[in-house]
Amino acid sequence: MTNAEKTQLEQRASVLTTRFEALMVMEQTPIIQDIIAEYMAEVDRIHAETTVKREYLFNFKSGGWNSEYAYTAEQAIEQAKARFADMDIDEKSFRASTPADYKNLLSLFY
C-alpha cells in the first residue's frame, strides 16, 4: 500500500462514518439497517487495513535482503534508508512480504 492509497482509504472511511451517523437519526427501516451494517463493515475493513503494519521485503543493490515493518511502502523505504544509511538500497525492490517469498529468501541461508 502506498501513502496515497492509505490516505484515500482513510478519507473513504470518514465519508462512510458521516453517512452512517446521518442514517442513525432516520427511521430504522430494514433497508436503512442493511445500509448501516454495510457501512460499518466497510469502515471496520478499512480500519483493519490501515492500522496494521506490514512487513516489506527489499533488496540491496550489492546483494542481500532485509525487511521493515511499516504502514506503507514509502514509510518502509524511509525507515530502511535511515537504518541502513551506509548501504545502497534498491527502492524498486520493496514489496509486501508473503509467506512464499519470505520462505524463499530464508532458503538462501541453508
Image: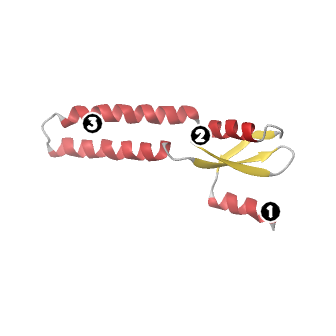
Q: Where residue 81 sits in the image (x, y, percent)?
A: 74, 37
Going by the numbered disc 1, the residue's amino acid type is Leu
Q: Secondary structure at mark 2?
A: loop
Going by the numbered disc 2, the residue's amino acid type is Thr
Q: Which residue is mark 2?
A: 72
Q: Secondary structure at mark 3?
A: helix
Q: Which residue is mark 3?
A: 20
Q: Quadrant of residue 93?
A: top right
Furthest toward the bottom, the residue is: 110
- Mark 1 crowd level (few <14, some 14–19, many ≥20, 10 Å Cα): few
Going by the numbered disc 3, the residue's amino acid type is Phe
- Mark 2 crowd level (few <14, some 14–19, many ≥20, 10 Å Cα): many
Q: Which residue is mark 1?
A: 108
| Mark sitting earlier along the chain (2/1) | 2
Q: Whole-Å distance between the Cαs marked 2 and 1? A: 26 Å
Front residue (pair 80, 19):
80
Q: Are marks 3 and 2 in contact (CB under 8 Å)?
A: no
Q: Quadrant of residue 106?
A: bottom right
| Mark sitting earlier along the chain (3/1) | 3
In the displayed structure image, the side of residue 41 where residue 4 appears, left or right: right
Q: Are marks 3 and 1 in contact (CB under 8 Å)?
A: no
